[in-house]
Amino acid sequence: MDWAYYWEVAKPYAGLVILFALFAAFVAERRPPAVTAVVAAAFMLLIGLLGSNDLMSVFSNPAPLTIGAMFILSGALVRTGVIEALAGLAARKAENRPYLAIGSFLGGTFVSSAFVNNTPVVIILIPIMRKIAKVTGIAASKLLIPLSYISIMGGSLTLLGTSTNLLVDGVAQENGQAAFGLFEITQVGLIAAAAGIAILAILGPLFLPNRSNDNLSDQIPESQYLTDIRFDDDSDFVGEKISDISAFTHSGISLIGIRKGNVIDRLGFADHVVTGGETLVAAVSQEELLSLAETNGIKLGYAGNMKPSAPLDDDNTRLVELVIGPSHRSVGKSLPSLPFLSRVPARVLGLSRPRHIAGPTLSSALIRHGDSLLVQTDDISVGVLQENADLVHLREPDAQAYRRRRAPVAIMTFVIIMIAATLGVMPIAALAMLGVAAVLLTRCIDSDEAWTAIDGNVLVLIFAMLAVGKGLENAGTIQLIIDVLLPLLKMISPLWLIIAVYSLTSLLTETATNNAVAVIMTPLVIGIAAQTGVDVRSLLVAVMFGASASFATPVGYQTNTLVYAAGNYHFSDFVRIGLPLNIGVGLAACMAIYYVF
């Protein structure tokens, strides 16, 4: 019996079984999608559907390289405070013109998502949107789902907007198709977004839940640190009005008052002209606290007799966050009573207390058990602090100072990439790599932060699914599916074919991960286009939009998952508003694709 012959006959069906099992595993969610995809690729390698050379060849695909580079470039915009500045501008307008502020905030999200990976953007914007909700009195549950949906629509405007677009482009190029231009899908994206925004404006007030902000489990404000800001005698800020000092205008900084002797002037100090030696009292976020600590001309916090000699950016300087234990002998006393301030070179930059701000000033605040201190010290002194059993949870702070002086470099890097990509100077992958080199060289972002900004799960999933796609192609499974569908597809018009491809892609995306669906659908539609004579680019764009425009479930897209937890939503909330949006945006996108392509 010729087993080799029977195996060759069975290969397409074996690939089909693996494909069904893979999607079933995605739906079951017993393991993370990346793990499931890696196991499927390994199994294909084991049974011979995928050769070792085929496996190695997936690493030459430009899409994962571009996606990884865009993660780093997005991280550089976050690190330099660009995203925070745009969001803070909208937040400051919320009190006087709430609806204009919300509109401009969502508009900024829409535009930035076209060029920056929208997951870190939404992570940053969620707490700011909650602040806007609190100021305006609008329930946060009315705003967070639109935030996610708008970011998804914005991501569909350009090739760089989502990893799915880049992945479809990369797989298409491997199958002999011409590369997509940066703005080739923009016209379709604008039409689809216009339909989506209109549906959201009409149905949002009816279908979005109106839950009180008080019911949100994570509505507790982000940690605010009480700190004292003392102006040096030779500070550049001397002679300026407090309201004119740009360092104090960011959204994470709330000025409480100016210290005059033992009294805190909390009224009318905005027009006060700064003189050397004066002290401001402020409540600031951890990121802004660290940013202020690096600002020339001011001294932050409180230091004992042994002040740290090295600046904050020195290699020997260490930042640690510690919590006062219940048996610490300084509980009930003011900050200067802390013993370590007289034993080691240390400066307390700020004090954070759960649920409210301590006071009236940092130096006079009475310490409570559970207070968190952010301390600047050195390597040797960290060991001394660790030995103190009454200082608990000693660790490095999660946040980092914004590098706002390098923001123009990060912005210019992005602009140059956009222009060069539009003009076709180089492939987008090469331009993105040059951009990464630029932001690393100019220290817009440090190397360790850059590698952390890369979402490893996404890249592993993409590489594994590229291998699975190659295995399905080798097995003849793709051709088998095309042969089965072809008689039906030849009977329908090009418009209905576009709708069918979009609908299938969208349905699979709601149950599995969008990048996995994109890898499977791309070679499939290339084969269908070759057999039916329909323009292949129209079907590729349908896959891009179908795999990205996921509104009906909280698991179909990462930003939906983020707001799902932050807004205390139910699964049904997404179905109610997302299902009409899926249909409306899908029909608009398909009509636009048909007429544009």
Image: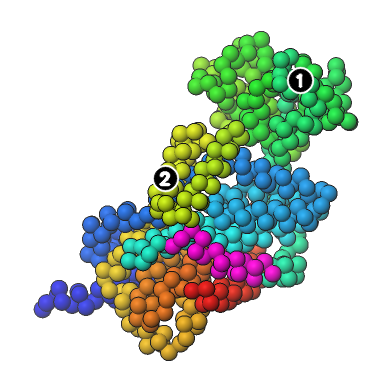
The answer to whether 88 appears left or right of 562 in the picture is: right
Which amino acid type corresponds to the residue marked 2 in the rendered image? Met
Q: Residue at x 83, y 23 (%)?
A: 273
Q: Which residues are magenta?
A: 180-198
> Helix, strand or loop at disc 2?
helix
Residue 568 seen anywhere in this rendered image of the structure: no
Q: Toward which corner of the image does residue 407 lie, by quadrant?
A: top right
In magenta segment, residue 192: yes
Residue 296 seen anywhere in this rendered image of the structure: yes
Q: Residue at x 34, y 69 (%)?
A: 18
Identify the residue at the far right of this view.
267
> Helix, strand or loop at disc 1?
loop
Q: Residue at x 24, y 76 (%)?
A: 10
Question: In the rendered view of the protein, which quadrant contains the N terminus?
Answer: bottom left
Q: Which residue is mark 2?
A: 433
Question: Where is 201 relative to 492, above or below?
Answer: above
Q: Residue at x 45, y 42 (%)?
A: 436
Secondary structure of the magenta portion, mostly?
A: helix
Q: Which residue is mark 1?
A: 238
Identify the residue at the far left of this view.
1
Which amino acid type corresponds to the residue marked 1 in the rendered image? Val
Answer with mark 2 or mark 1, whichever residue precedes in sequence.
1
